[in-house]
Image: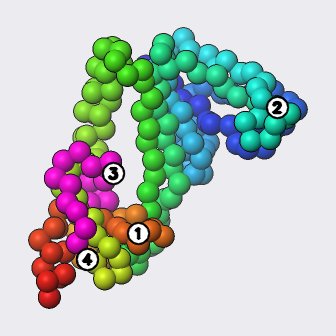
Amino acid sequence: MLRYYASPKRDQIHSPEPLDITIHRHVFDVETARSGGRVIGTFDETWQPDIRRVANSIRPGEEQWAIVNNNENNPSFMIQMWHRYSPEQLKTATSMKHNDIFFYRDPGNKEHDLLSRRFYRLFGKFATNRDQTSFWMPERRFWSEQKKGSLFWLGYDAIRWAKEDPQRVFFYNTNGWAFRPDDAGVIRQAAAD
């Protein structure tokens, strides 16, 4: 059974008081899941956080609180919900920023590999990393096409949102590129015109 907890915030790890970690059975029971913070998930029902004072890697001579995890024995994942959009915001938005999901495991561990495949098979019911087109903004010049295995996963509702308006893009960032689902021909044709 999956268990979840909030990743400690910066002020908590620098506090003289020990971290107080609450384990939850549902991702949305974790307060930060609704407010844009990080949620850590573990698959081990018996796992308890190992909280220790450790050296601060950025400020020598200072200590901070940390949760020490051993991913060899305990694969886990992290969900970072940076951005949420209201229905009103979605009507006028032309760019949707990203959220993050990371899966941590011991490479080469067959049980972890199996669990990872099961995780992504289940995740694939809600999102896909196939059929994406990247391009340079703002001129929308074609850059690349990812038929399968893109680093970025798009939820099916997000794909529907993007396809409702050809001007809508994902992850338009300071590097000047963005991507859309499944429309390489449209981008290539626009670039040729």
Is residue 87 in view? no
Q: Are marks 3 and 2 in contact (CB under 8 Å)?
A: no
Residue 52 lies in the magenta-colored region = no
Q: Are marks 4 and 1 in contact (CB under 8 Å)?
A: no
Give the farthest residue toward the bottom.
193
Q: Is residue 39 left or right of residue 134?
A: right
Magenta span: 142-159
Q: Position of residue 161 (x, y in %)?
A: 29, 66
> Is disc 3 surrounded by few (<14), some (14 to 19) or many (20+) residues within 10 Å?
some
Which of the marked residues, 3 or 2, is nearer the chain's N terminus? 2
Q: Quadrant of residue 190?
A: bottom left
* Label placed on residue 141: 4
Q: CA distance from mark 3 to mark 2?
A: 35 Å
Which of the marked residues, 4 or 1, is nearer the chain's N terminus? 4
Residue beneath label 2, please?
Answer: 63
Q: Nearer the viewer, residue 167 or 113?
A: 113
Q: CA distance from mark 3 to mark 4?
A: 19 Å
Residue beneath label 3, please?
Answer: 152
Q: Which is in the foreground here, disc 3 or disc 2?
A: 2
